Amino acid sequence: RAGAHGGKAYHLSDATPPPSYWDLMDRLLVACGREPPRASIPREFLVVMARVSEALYARVGAHLEQEPFFSYEGVAVVASDCWFNTSAIRRDLGWKPPVPPDEAAARTAAWFTTHPIPRPLVAWRGLFRR
């Protein structure tokens, strides 16, 4: 039986103010024993480089076995923050996060230590900073 809230969509998130993308990435990098990037590249420059990368891929992409690593969508994801209001699920269903944020970061870092990031991604990690 669905009850009074059947069919309603809810967002799940923790109760803390959301960290910026880079605050979260810095926390995870440190937890994985890596140093966070210290330099940044302007978003506008990255957008131009992503468009060039996509244009080159459009010309020679049929000969490659993977999608372009550097894309406009990738720049858009790392250059913006996104969070959701969870007050409805807390109010309607009494939901609360099952794992505190610090424990979630530690679990994620533990997963990354057993599933290493491929070297090309590590080499590019500092390019997307705001």
Image (cartoon, rainbow, N blue to C red):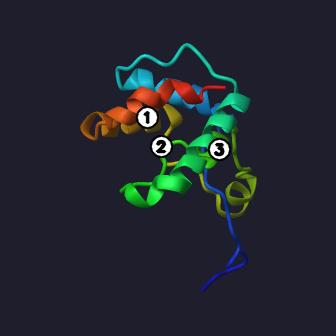
Instruction: Give the vertical position of 91 relative to 8 (above or below).
Output: above
Query: Badges 3 and 2: C-beta atoms under 8 Å apart?
Result: no
Indicate the quadrant containing the C terminus: top left, top right, bottom left or bottom right: top right
Q: Nearer the viewer, mark 3 or mark 1?
A: 3
Label disc, if present, on residue 64 of the rendered structure? none
Per the image, the residue denoted by label 3 is 51
Amino acid type assigned to the residue bearing label 1 in the image: Glu
Q: CA distance from mark 3 to mark 2?
A: 39 Å
Per the image, the residue denoted by label 2 is 99
Mark 3 closeness class: few <14, some 14–19, many ≥20 residues within 10 Å: some
Residue found farthest to the left:
114
Q: Position of residue 33 (x, y in %)?
A: 35, 20
Q: Position of residue 55 (x, y in %)?
A: 60, 49
Query: Badges 1 and 2: C-beta atoms under 8 Å apart?
Result: yes
Q: Position of residue 104 (x, y in %)?
A: 45, 38
Indicate the quadrant containing the N terminus: top left, top right, bottom left or bottom right: bottom right
Per the image, the residue denoted by label 1 is 103
